[in-house]
Image: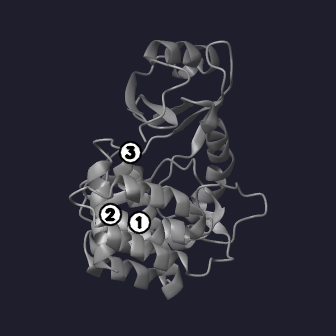
Amino acid sequence: MNQPRAEIQIGIQTFQRLLSAQFPALADLPITLVDEGWDNITFLLGTEYAVRLPRRELAVKLLLHEQLWLPVLADRLPLEIPVPIHFGQPDTEFPWPWSIVHWIPGTTADAHDFSAADVRLLTATLQALHQPASSDAPENPFRGIPLHTRHQGVTQRLARQRNHPEVDAPRLAALWEELCSIPASTDRVWLHGDLHPRNIIIRDGTLVGIIDWGDLNGGDAATDLACAWLLLDTAVKRQKFFTLYNAEPAQIRRAQGWALHMGLTLLDSNEPRHVPLGLATLKRVLEDA
C-alpha cells in the first residue's frame, strides 16, 4: 500500500500566487517545502507559520476538522499543537480550503529516546485530551472504532507478510484473535487518531508538540494509547506510560491490538521511512504479549 498520488500538484510558485492573492501581508516571507504526506503538503512560511494544503479531495474534510476543533482543544493540552491562524479559501488556482497554522519548530521523534519526563508529559497530554467528546465531534471510520472491524485488513496484511524473515506471523495472528475477543469500549473521548513518531515534535531533546490532527475524532482511547508501542522502546517505559495514564487492563489490551494493526499497516506500506517503525512496533507488541 503505497502513498496515494496527489490529485492536485502544488509547488512553491503556485502557493506563492495563492498567498499573494489572499494574504498579501505574508507574501514576502520565504517559503520552504517541508513535507508531502498522504493527505497534505506542508510548507514553512517564514519562521513562525506552517501551511497545510490538501493534496487529495479526501483530505479536505480532515483539514476542516482541524480548523474547527484545534482552537477548541489547544487550551487544555500541555503540549504545543498547530492551531490554525488563517484560513485559505478555494479559488481558481486551488479548489480546496487550506490553512496557515502555528509552526512548531523541532524535529520528528523517529529516533528519539523518550525520557521519563517525556513519558509523563505524553500521558498528561493524552489524559487532558481524552475527555468525553461532544455529540458533534467528527466520526472516523478508521480510528477509535471496535478493534474487530479491522480484522479483514489485519489478516490480509499478515498473509502478505507471512514470509518476511522478521515477522512472526503465526504468533501475531494468534495474538490478534485473542485481542479482538476483548469487549469493545462504549466510551467516546476526543482522540488524535494518528500518534506515531513523525507526528511528534522534539526540540532540544525534549517532547514539545503533536502535529497532524486530521484524524481527530471521538472514539475509544485505545487507538491513541497504541502509541506506547510506536514510541517507547522498552517494556519498562510502556508500563510506566500505562500506570501514569491509569489505564484499565482491557484498555491496554485493546491498545495492543491497535498497535499490532498499525505496525502491520506501516510495514505493508513498503515506504522506507515506515517499514523500520512497523517492524519495531510488531517486535514490541510481541515482547509484551
Indicate the position of residue 58 as horizontal and vertical percent values.
62, 36
Indicate the position of residue 239 as horizontal and vertical percent values.
35, 82
Q: How many other residues sit within 10 Å of disc 1, few (<14), some (14-19) or many (≥20)?
A: many
Helix, strand or loop at label 2? It is: helix
- The residue depicted at 43 percent of the width and 59 percent of the height is 262
- The residue depicted at 46 percent of the width and 32 percent of the height is 42
The answer to whether 96 is drawn above or below residue 123 in the figure is above
For badge 3, the amino acid type reads Ser
Indicate the position of residue 231 as horizontal and vertical percent values.
33, 63
User: What residue occupies the far right of the structure in this picture?
Assistant: 135
Viewer can see residue 193: no
Helix, strand or loop at label 3? It is: loop
The C terminus is located in which quarter? Answer: bottom left
Label 3: which residue?
269
- The residue depicted at 52 percent of the width and 22 percent of the height is 26
The answer to whether 126 is drawn above or below residue 42 in the figure is below
Which is nearer the N-term, disc 3 or disc 1? Answer: 1
Viewer can see residue 95: yes
Q: Splitting the image into 4 quarters, where does residue 279 fall?
A: bottom left
Q: In this view, does 140 lie to the left or right of 265?
A: right
Q: How many other residues sit within 10 Å of disc 3, few (<14), some (14-19) or many (≥20)?
A: some
For badge 2, the amino acid type reads Thr
The CA distance from mark 3 to mark 2 is 14 Å
* Residues marked 2 and 1 touching at CB (< 8 Å): yes
Q: Splitting the image into 4 quarters, where does residue 185 fall?
A: bottom right
Indicate the position of residue 134 as horizontal and vertical percent values.
75, 64
Q: Select label 3 or label 2 by which is in front.
A: 3
Label 1: which residue?
260
Which is nearer the N-term, disc 3 or disc 2? Answer: 3
Label 2: which residue?
281
